[in-house]
Image (tube, coloured by chain):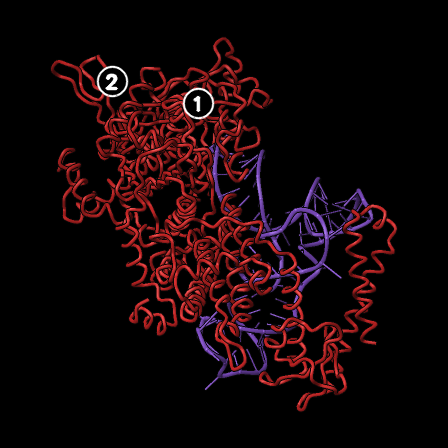
Chain colours: A red, B purple
Amino acid sequence: MDAERRKALETTTRWEPGEVEQRVFERWMEGGWFHPPAEGTPEANYSIAIPPPNVTGALHMGHALNGTIQDVLIRLHRMQGRNTMWILGTDHAGIATQSVVEKELAAQGVLRTELGRDQFIAKVWEWRHLHGNTIVEQYKRLGASCDYERERFTLDEGYVTAVYRVFAELYSKGYIYRDNYMVNWDPGLQSAISDLELEDREVTDTLYQIAYPLEAVRGHEAEEAAADAGELVVATVRPETMLAVTAIAVNPRDDRYRDVVGRHAILPLVGRRLPVIADEYVKTDFGTGALKITPGHDPNDFEIGRMHGLEEVSVIGEDGLITENAPERFRGMTVTQAREAVVAELREQGLIRGEEPYTHDVPFSHRSGERIEPLISLQWFCRMNELAEPAVRVVTEGRVRIIPDGARRQYLNWMERIRPWCISRQLWWGHRLPVWYRGDETYVGEHPPEGEGWEQESDVLDTWFSSALWPFATLGWPDTDAPEFTAFFPTDVMVTARDIINLWVARMIMTSLEFTGKVPFSDVYVHSVIQAPDGRRMSKSLGTGIDPLDEIEVHGADALRFGLLAMSSTQDVRYSEARVQQGRDLANKMWNASRLILLNAQVADAAAVRAAAAKVAADDVPVEDRWIASRLQRAITSVTESIERYDFAHAALDLYDFFWSELCDWYLEIVKARLYGDDDEPVDSAASATLLWTLERVLALAHPLMPFVTEEVYSYLPVSESEALAVHPFPEPDPDLIDEGAEAEIGAAIELTRALRRWRDLAGVPAAQVLSARANGSDPHELVGRLARVEFGSGHGEAIATVEGVELLETEGVDPDAARARIEERRAKLRSEVERGERKLGNEGFVAKAPADVVDEERRKLEAYRAELDELG
RNA sequence: GGGCGCGUAGCUCAGUGGGAGAGCGCUCGCUUCACACGCGAGAGGUCGCUGGUUCGAAACCAGCCGCGCCCACCA
């Protein structure tokens, strides 16, 4: 270590992540360690495809947790020597990106429609080149070790080829087709959107009861005269859609309506003859028990209509205005105007039988925020049944493990009743469907066929269509000889949040099986959603969002990573800044503990350190060295196993416990005397060796979780075998270093030290005062005297207290009354323990039925408590 | 309505059959030569409620109360 660096180490008493993180990250990039060669087999290699963030996106807490988890896995496997690749890329995010650019243009007074499709798309590309890299840069702040040199985009050239190939094949298999179907029309976007892009909002509408006169039954003049043929009253919150009603439905078991099934009603204002049909769907206990059927404007009615072969009438157009299918006087009105006009006319004709406020959930567009208008429209669909079947099988057979199990059930649940997927969107930004029309002819393929007059379909594909190909299209598919594809596909794990299991994960599994014949990943790990501290969703519009970059700014990336991991779980969790601060404190602790070691370790030369380290566990090294080596093995095991079973909270907290409580609070305090030496004792170089040996391993262990501080400290190690900690071998637990004797011995010494300190505190002994003491049995470990400030051996005075077999002797300034109180307290505790043990062992059922080792343990404890009680008198 | 899950210290959460844990907060004491983002000690919990299973239940089962998420959604 040169003088300058040593000076920096001496004077920097706090971990200051700001400039260090940037410098460390640049070193990683220069080292090229995140950019693996496309070699080897997918079985030997390790790869993860990142859930591609939207190009328009900014890093939010969800990304931060998702990215941290993947980076932990990636770094662990890279350090374990696997050829490791984290596949990076962004999603073109059709709707989101189009809206952003559209808004930006609107601010300049330019409308998308004025610009025309080609020019608008050019503007979007321009935007992407200017701003599309923001989120990728933000992932770097987090420390994400993605392969930044192989970044992909769902609209880059090769990716488009993959998308078109998939579309064409699904079309030729007959899975993709065009049909009139009820879609969720977003009047704001002027596009169909999927069920999954909806959000329900509570709305209070007016529920109108409207009378529909029944048509007289021919040949029953008497009845006609008597009852005016009667009427059916139906309830609706959308009177304007009555213009498109084509039937009335009642429940077949509803006695009130048994006689009217098969007859006809007359649609007021329009005059259409409406058959009265019977369908189980109609609830007898809601409204009047009679339901108007509007196949053109209601998803349920649409299904009933198809089932009964009803006419489908659309009176609301894609522009949100009343169409020519409605009576002339309503045409061209907005939905709201039409509603008022219809109600007014009905009122005039005396057909309104009731009205009341009605609060219900109504779907709104997640994207534009507008109320969804269910419409029948000509769209492209993909039938999912054939694709779903093998995708269910790989999960039930365990070829794809979905963790946790709740997420697995959610997946299977959804797949069981999968429905056709509407894959067309009326947008400009996206993959334009590879479909060409000329008159009545339709051709599907990336390029138009020979000849004049072919026009390409104007719709684009749902963004999720391209995302569904992510794990293989990013690696070069459909070129199955592409080096990246042969080396890294299938990937190992997909890390994601619960909300897109159906939207995305399921579809990746389906397309991957269909097109590559392989599962895209063997594990799906579904992690928490981070909520705002008050339990609401973190969202920009609610103002509940917390920006991970702000947290990195304040506490450092390692702190945020640790905090997110520690708070993560399979449940949704509330964001806890305290956990992030815990991470910051741990990073600081690592920095300072490392300073202690690095500034004080005696290093003759590299060979000496290696030689000393080689005998860390030898019998003749001090027991505390064997203890820390043994505890380290246990920490390595627990942290590694936790990560491997995706239990990141325990990995983080176990690391914390080992580092803070065992290494810092005990081992470093114990070893200081040997490290510094004093008048009597020379400096012990074995201590230095153990410290350096331990430090190197614990840094490596912590590195996947907290890469920056560990990498920085690693650069100060006097002896290190790797260019960077990022590519240093990950420690493996060594069973030979487990030393139960040393653990028991130091464990007992720790217990005793704590008991003595407790006594001191309760007795009000000043912190600096050294107490005289006498051990009843053999002298405790040297560390007890030092750490508890107790001097053993020399005193002859009377014992004023006994603590865990140690007699504390009368010492000037120590209050004997407090001591007696303390002893009495201990006696009381022992008596209750003895009582508890006797009661338990006196229980015949317990002795007879509990496992022998549990019973033996109880007996052992009881003996020990009795012995101590006797000793106290 | 169906499915899944949660209810443990003041707060955020671990703990899944054998003596209730962590972090933060709180109290007391420490300018102890790595760290006050620190060190030492401590207080604080009828583990939502009621039954049941068991020698033994925070944990397993049933019911109830409260909360959340996902599906399906009554016009």
x and y, in percent, of residue A168 in the image = 29, 19
| Nearest the eye: B44 or A558 | A558
In the image, taking residue A850 as reference, residue A693 lies left or right, namely: left
Are dots 1 and 2 on a single chain?
yes
Q: Is residue A5 above or below residue B28?
A: above
Q: Nearer the viewer, mark 1 or mark 2?
A: 2
Q: Say which chain tag 1 marks.
A: A
The residue at the point 49 percent across, 24 percent down is A231
Does any portion of residue A572 appear in the rendered image? Answer: no
Quadrant of residue A208 in the image? Answer: top left
Q: Amino acid at mark 1?
A: Glu
Quadrant of residue A657 in the image? Answer: bottom right
x and y, in percent, of residue A24 in the image = 31, 57
Label 1 residue SS: helix
| Nearest the eye: A612 or A579 | A612
Q: Say which chain tag 2 marks.
A: A
**Which residue corresponds to mark 2?**
A444
**Which residue corresponds to mark 1?**
A303
In the image, taking residue A777 as reference, residue A495 lies left or right, namely: left
In the image, taking residue A70 as reference, residue A124 lies left or right, namely: left
Mark 1 closeness class: few <14, some 14–19, many ≥20 residues within 10 Å: some
